Amino acid sequence: MKFLKSYTFRVILQGVLTIWAVTTFTFFLIRLMPGNPIQLKIDELMQRQGLTEEEARNQTATLFEFDPDQPLIEQYVNYMVRLLQGDLGKSISSARTPVGQQLLKFLPWTLFSVGMGLLVSFTVGVTIGLAMAYWRGGWLDNIFTVFASVIYGIPDYVIALIIIMVLGVQLKVLPFGEMLGGSTQGIEPGFTFEYIADLVKHAILPVTTYVLSSVGGWILTMKSSTISTLGEDYITVARARGLSERRLLIAYIGRNAMLPLVTRLAISIGFVVGGSAIIETLFLYPGLGRNLVLAIGARDYTTMQGIFLVIAVAVVVSNILADLLFGVLDPRVRLSKDTGNK
Amino acid sequence: MSAAPQLSVLSGRFARLRLSLRQILRALTRNKAGFIGFLGVSFFVLMTTVGPLIVPYEGEPRFDRLQPGSRTLFAAPSLEHPLGLDYKGRDVLSHIVHGGRGLIITAIEAGILTTLVAVGLGALAGLIGGYVDQIISMVGNFILTIPQFPLLLVLATILSFEDKIGLAVLLSLLNWPTLMRAVRAQVMSLKARDYVEAAFALDLGLWHITTREVLPNMISYIVVNMIFTIRSAMYAIVGLMFLGIVPLTEPDWGLMIFLGRQQGSLSSADASWMLLAPVLAIALFQLSLVLFTRSLEEIFNPRLRQGV
């Protein structure tokens, strides 16, 4: 009984309800899109193989186990019942592959590239922001204020296109063609140096883009957060105690200034999972974003649904995580939450 | 008899206006980054309004420009065509000058609509509270949970847009929750302050309290937020065009990027200008907007201005 009233339980219940609401909403929404996967396949067969409409219709009937004439409500109930059993259905457009399997195939690419990008930009941004605030008005501050403001204002795909155009096409210093996609065909996947080097080579472009497009934001927030921390009494007290500047900077100023940023980091983990459709499409990177775009084009309802589910879960989980993390990192919040519950 | 005092009131008003104009100018130039942003935005506004009168638009393919021995009509910048030629041999500069207007206008429409919806709902939620507040907040939180761009991809496919205003409406429906939350929080905290309570006591009505007492206090935040919404709307529109989801009409920067990528701008140096030009235009415009917010903050935030 006590658990049912606890803060954690309420948060989890709310999360589950949100995921259900998003799933339901997207279920009906994607079925509103003009055309359906079967019609698209029929059109494709008629065009490519020169079949008559009837032949094409017969051929597709054996390909799909999806019936577009079934009432929507029935489809929805079926879907939800299967979902609760952990069955995401089969992909409509790619030869009946289970959607769960597909997601497992797409997800590592996105997690690897976006995760790398986020980690690097966060670390670099926090370090630079801290240094800028500590040596306010110095050359470092001036240079990076300009850099961060400029880079912060430019959209990610514009950064990506500029990298390709300037380094790859005009100056020809990047072997751009070889760097597209997720990995080179023919290299055996495994823990070999060759394969890992290949993965890194293909991930450089998307990761660099993610880093450049988000590092400005981290720098500017960390700088302003640090500046407000510098004015706190406990910093003055710590300095008066004669602590070394190094210890002061890292343990007292840096840690406290980072607090609000860590929460933002946790929240953004959820959003980046699905938020890279354009960049992945541009670099032909085989992650969730690019496959969502492909699934939308093919009206592959089940795959789309699966990707939306993953994104919704990621957003909800990261929000909960941010909430809990903040309590763990900042004892003041933990205290007020506990007392609020009693 | 009564004309004299009226006149003095009038001239007094003018004096105040002149002063505030001078203040605006000072606020504009005081922040260096903000001033650069202001110049940038002015440049783009001039280019898209006056520019088309100077640079004629080239819509038809120009096969006559095919260089002997060359297989494509693409060309790198020259004196005659400062930004080169596109895949149909047309002047890229003319497309840059003519192609920004629709995009910028749609983005601004989206920004204004979003701001109106967000401020309206936020004020409503904050002032009335209760069920109205709960419903508005719930819908807002729900929209924030679904990632914007994937949702936009699906919605843009469903609603095939005849007119770009439809796109602006859609963008505002997806973008209002952030600003709404801020307005709601502000209204709630302001509601408790003396001068708003006084207005309530005088029975001045919700509309009066919102427009006269509450909103002027957060105008700086609203304006800056609107600029950021304009920016993200432009990001979304060009993104949709890039993926080929929004129906495209020439001339348009977004379409130039889409076609450039399709026509091989990513593989040849001569061809890359068709793509590089709109990419740089979008980057510079967005950058100018972001920098411009610094000046806007100083103009609209009296507390910052007092430091002048």
Image (tube, rainbow, N blue to C red):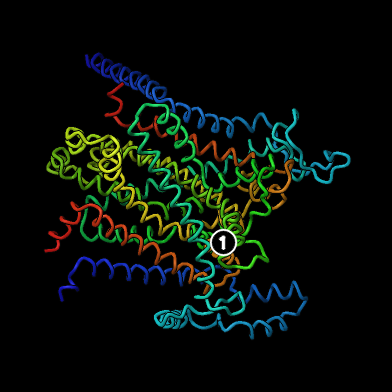
Amino acid type at image mark 1: Arg
Mark 1 crowdedness (10 Å alpha carbons): few <14, some 14-19, many ≥20: many
In which quadrant is the C terminus of chain B drawn? Answer: top left
Judging from the image, mark 1 belongs to the subunit labelled A
Local secondary structure at mark 1: helix
Residue ID at (56%, 83%): A67
Please provide percent x and percent y for residue A301: 53, 73
Q: Is residue B54 left or right of residue B195?
A: right
Q: Nearer the viewer, residue A171 or B271?
A: A171
Q: Is residue A284 visible?
A: yes
Q: Is residue A328 above or below residue A10?
A: above
Where is residue A106 shown, x and y percent of the image? 53, 67
In this image, B102 relative to A19: left or right?
Answer: right
Measured along the vertical axis of the image, is residue A263 above or below residue B213?
A: below
Which of the 4 image quarters holds residue A216?
top left
Q: Position of residue B61 (x, y in %)?
A: 78, 44
The residue that disc 1 covers is: A290
Residue situated in front as seen by the camera: B155 or A83? A83
| Residue in front for this viewpoint, B272 or A283 | A283
Q: Is residue B3 above or below residue A289?
A: above
